[in-house]
Image (cartoon, grey):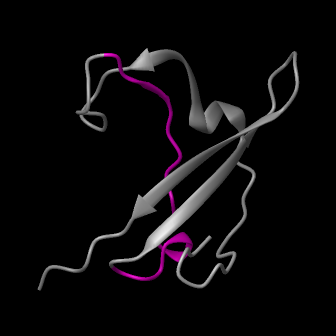
Amino acid sequence: MDEATNELVSTSSPAVADVVSNTLQLDGRWPKDKLGYNVAYPTAAAETPEPNASYLFKIKFTPVTGAPFFEYYRVRTLAPAF
């Protein structure tokens, strides 16, 4: 969702195996800490079309057992460097 316009930009339903790892990943994509990550959702340029804008990703997780739940991620795009 484009937070400036509240416009839904895109929806998708990726396969769990494509975005969730069973173990924590420690590679160059996550320099924030030594714990790692286990969810990686690569976005297409069409999902964040405006430079220097804020987008809210709402991701629904549906576990094998238990109730589905949502996680929210705010992403700020960069202005192009010319």
18 or 73, nearer to the observer: 73
The answer to whether residue 24 is above or below residue 17 is above
Residue most extreme to the left? 82
Left or right of residue 58, residue 68 in this image = right
Judge whether residue 15 is colored magenta.
no
The x, y position of residue 74, in whole percent, is 48, 56
The answer to whether residue 46 is above or below residue 63 is below
Left or right of residue 52, residue 57 in this image = right
Judge whether residue 50 is colored magenta.
yes
74 or 31, nearer to the observer: 74
How many numbered badges does the structure rendering display? 0
Left or right of residue 9, residue 53 in this image = left
Residue at the spot 51% in from the left edge and 59% down from the top edge:
43
Dividing the picture into quadrants, the one containing residue 78 is bottom left
Residue at the spot 33% in from the left edge and 78% down from the top edge:
52
Which quadrant is the C terminus positioned in?
Answer: bottom left
The residue stretch that appears in magenta: 35-51
- Magenta span: predominant SS is loop
Dividing the picture into quadrants, the one containing residue 57 is bottom right
Left or right of residue 64, residue 6 in this image = left
Residue at the spot 57% in from the left edge and 75% down from the top edge:
2
The answer to whether residue 35 is above or below residue 77 is above
Dividing the picture into quadrants, the one containing residue 1 is bottom right
The x, y position of residue 63, in whole percent, is 80, 24
The x, y position of residue 18, in whole percent, is 61, 37
Residue at the spot 31% in from the left edge and 21% down from the top edge:
26
